[in-house]
Image (tube, rainbow, N blue to C red):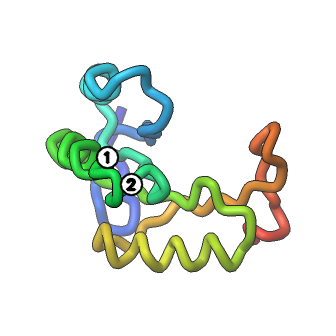
Amino acid sequence: MSDFTVAGTTLSSRLLLGTSHYPSPQILSDAVASSGTNVLTVGLRRMQPESGGGNSFWQRVQAMKCHILPNTAGCHTAEEAITLAQMAREIFGTAWIKLEVIGDDYTLQPDTHATL
């Protein structure tokens, strides 16, 4: 498969891989290595600096040498998603964002109106 370019960044894989809900950090690392992905989606809510939990996760993700696509997972309003997107731009130093606004907590279906 040929390379493709997104926002001036050339990627060799079209797979965007999420980083949540893996049984262990090692399984996440193995999945990234096996998939050949160049892009990892990362939710800011996964970072919990007050408990020290975010640092080891972030160090592991950085070691994978993938582009980071921050997402607004867990947001329930457009305002919350916009605020989180602005924070992601500052924290990750990227203009890339995967915008998500949850419409239904049970199914996690998006609120399409709020997302637009």
Q: Dot 1, how many residues are within 10 Å of its Cα: few (below 14), some (14-19), or many (20+)?
A: few
User: Up-down: is 102 above or below 26?
Assistant: below
- Foreground tag (1 vs 2): 1
The C terminus lies in quadrant: bottom right
- State if disc 2 and disc 1 touch (CB < 8 Å): yes
Quadrant containing the N terminus in the rendered view? top left
Q: Please tell me which residue is depicted at 34% across the width and 59% down the height of the picture.
A: 50
Q: Position of residue 25 (x, y in %)?
A: 30, 28
Amino acid, disc 1: Gly
Q: In front: 113, or 48? A: 48
**Image-based side of 104 in relation to 9, left or right:** right
Nearest the eye: 99 or 57: 57
| Disc marking residue 47 | 2
Packing grade of label 2 (10 A; few <14, some 14-19, many >=20) is some
Query: Disc number at residue 18?
Result: none
For the point 38% across and 68% down, the residue is 7
Which residue is more in the foreground, 1 or 36? 36
Residue at image coords 49%, 31%? 21
> Foreground residue, 34 or 100?
100
Q: Position of residue 8 (x, y in %)?
A: 31, 67
Labels 1 and 2: the sequence-earlier one:
2
The quadrant where residue 37 appears: top left
Up/down of 44 relative to 53, above or below: below
Q: Circle 2 — which element?
A: loop
Q: Quadrant of residue 56?
A: top left
Position of residue 3 relative to residue 49, above or below, is: above
Identify residue type, mark 2: Met
Residue named by callout 1 = 53
Judging from the image, what secondary structure is the residue with disc 1 in?
helix
In this rendering, would 116 be left or right of 55?
A: right
